[in-house]
Structure formats: structure tokens, C-alpha cells
Amino acid sequence: MARQLNVNGTTHDVDLPDNVPLLWVLRDEIGLTGTKFGCGVAACGACTVQIDGEAVRSCQVALADVWGEVTTIEGLGTPDNMATIQQAWVDHQVAQCGYCQSGQIMNAAALLAEIPAPTDQEIDDAMQGNLCRCGTYPRIRAAIKDAAQRIADKV
């Protein structure tokens, strides 16, 4: 069934079956490959995107179930104008292999939108579904806390 999908502020005409996972629509149909396939069962978080600001695992959201605007890592910021969370990620040298990082960042951005000054426990709770095989969790937490402070300083 043909439908329109708003991704990163751009409307895309998509003619795929209703049950196609959003992950494959983004990667294969629209060409946004920043969202990664990790496990296919929503256990790792590599495919995390936002729908209307809510962090979701795109491997488990069927095309027919997309309820609002989709934001991917490509829509969060650009290399010349990174989102605050992305800049904190770079400054804290969070990424090692980098595979999980787009999902980590999208989840962290949703966390900061909901809880502007999260505690360590709130960060750990929010991020627990995003796995990092390189074990950069301390740097992830530090980057989130730094981004929260930078955002607070702008206000």
C-alpha cells in the first residue's frame, strides 16, 4: 500500500507492504544507512530512531505502525552543525568501533528531551537497552551528562 512517510522533515512516498520493518524502509528504500541493523529483535538498540521524539527500535516497528515524524541520526544534526549530544559524543571520544553509536545517540537525545538533567541512574536506566560491545558505557554516560550541562547553559 502506498503511503507517505515523513523522515527528517522530508516526505517520502513509500509503496511497500505494511509489515516491512521501518529499519529496512529507512535503509533500503530511502537510503538512510546511519540506522544500523544489529539483532532484529529489539535487544541491542543499534536500530534506534525517534518517532515523534520517542526512541524506538526500528527493526520492530512495521511501516503501517509508524505514527508520526521519524528522525534518524542523519536528521539530528550535520557534520557542520552537530546536535549538542553529537558534539559531546565527539568531545568525549565515545565511539570505538562506532557501530552502535547512532542508536546510542538517538536514545540519548530522546532521554535529554524528556529529562533535561538526568542522574546517573536515570541515564543507566534509559540506556540499558542499547548495547555497546566495545564497553564505552562510562564515556556514554559522561557525554550525556556533558550534553545536559551544555543544554542547560544555553537556557
Image (cartoon, rainbow, N blue to C red):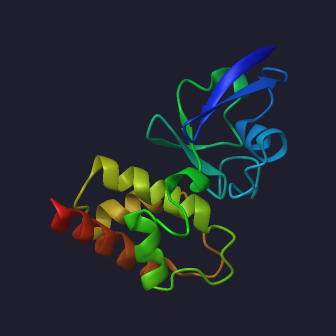
Q: Count the labels in the image.
A: 0
- Quarter containing the C terminus: bottom left
**Residue 114, placed above or below residue 34:** above
**Residue 55, placed above or below residue 64:** below
Q: Where is residue 117 shown, x and y percent of the image?
A: 22, 61
> Going by the image, does 74 lie left or right of 64?
left
Q: Where is residue 137 shown, x and y percent of the image?
A: 48, 77
Residue drawn at point x = 26 percent, y = 61 percent: 118
Residue drawn at point x = 43 percent, y = 84 percent: 91
> Going by the image, does 76 lie left or right of 20?
left
Residue drawn at point x = 60 percent, y = 62 percent: 102
> Going by the image, does 13 lie left or right of 71?
right
Task: Give residue 92's quadrant in the image.
Answer: bottom left
Q: Nearer the viewer, residue 145 or 78?
A: 78
Q: Nearer the viewer, residue 60 or 82?
A: 82
Q: Where is residue 150 shown, x and y percent of the image?
A: 25, 70
